[in-house]
Image: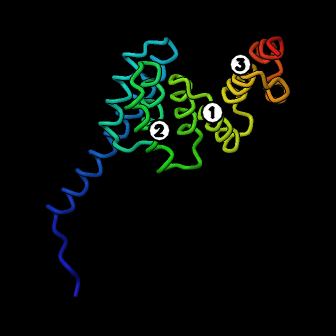
């Protein structure tokens, strides 16, 4: 015996699906606007846009990472720590969590933790230039010139024309 379809339930499910799709599209637009604000170094606007994006699409990895990064620039390290921990927990293979944790450690002056987190970034994304340059500079500051040179050489392999590679080599 065929089961009678309830038109109300079908319409309700279709409306829910459309609402979720609209929210995802809106969140994608907000993410793009947040990236543009970051490129302009408009940290306050970027933070606002990332927050709105997360409101539209809660738990989105890109919005979580973007907001965590901007919070570091805005000096909201405790809140950034919470989002970084979420990134590491939910997406352990994503280098954004350790990147934010490394930046927080740098801001707090915890060199050992910064080094550990930047090294973790490199295990996840071997040629990540930000990690290589920051590790190189941290090693120079500690007087570990051989290690700094190794990071500088690796950076130069991945980004030979990057002026930061040349600058790091000059610091050593």
Classify residue 80 by image quadrant.
top left
Q: Are marks 1 and 2 in contact (CB under 8 Å)?
A: no
| Disc 2 to disc 3, C-alpha distance | 26 Å
Number of the label disc, if any, that sits on residue 141:
3
Q: Is residue 126 left or right of residue 47?
A: right
Task: Identify the element where label 2 is drawn.
Answer: helix
The Cα atoms of the two marked residues, 1 and 2, are separated by: 18 Å
Residue in front for this viewpoint, 115 or 58 = 115
The residue that appears at 49% across and 11% down in the rendered structure is 40
| Residue at 21% across, 61% down | 10
Q: For residue 4, what is the image quadrant?
A: bottom left
Q: Position of residue 3 (x, y in %)?
A: 20, 80
Q: Secondary structure at mark 1?
A: helix
Instruction: For mark 3, give the secondary structure.
Output: helix
Q: Quadrant of residue 166?
A: top right
Closer-to-camera residue (90/63): 90
**Do the numbered discs 1 and 3 sit on residues whose CB atoms are within 8 Å?**
no
Q: Which residue is mark 1?
A: 112
Q: Write down the residue under mark 2.
A: 84
Q: Earlier in the sequence, mark 1 or mark 2?
A: 2
Dot 1 crowding, Cα within 10 Å, few <14, some 14–19, many 20+: few
Q: Residue at x 31, y 40 (%)?
A: 22
Distance between the alpha carbons at the discs numbered 1 and 3: 12 Å
């Amino acid at each position: 015996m065929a089961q009678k379809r309830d038109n109300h339930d079908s319409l309700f499910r279709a409306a829910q699906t459309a609402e979720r799709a609209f929210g995802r599209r809106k969140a994608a637009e907000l993410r793009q606007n947040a990236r543009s604000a970051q490129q302009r170094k408009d940290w306050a606007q970027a933070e606002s846009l990332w927050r709105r994006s997360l409101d539209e699409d809660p738990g989105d990895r890109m919005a979580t990472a973007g907001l965590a990064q901007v919070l570091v620039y805005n000096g909201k390290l405790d809140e950034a720590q919470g989002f970084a921990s979420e990134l590491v927990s939910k997406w352990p293979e994503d280098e954004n969590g350790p990147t934010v944790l490394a930046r927080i450690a740098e801001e707090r002056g915890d060199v050992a933790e910064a080094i550990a987190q930047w090294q973790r970034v490199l295990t996840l994304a071997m040629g990540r230039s930000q990690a290589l340059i920051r590790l190189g500079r941290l090693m120079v500051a500690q007087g570990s010139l051989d290690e700094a040179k190794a990071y500088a050489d690796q950076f130069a392999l991945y980004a030979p024309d990057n002026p930061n590679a040349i600058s790091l080599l000059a610091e050593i």
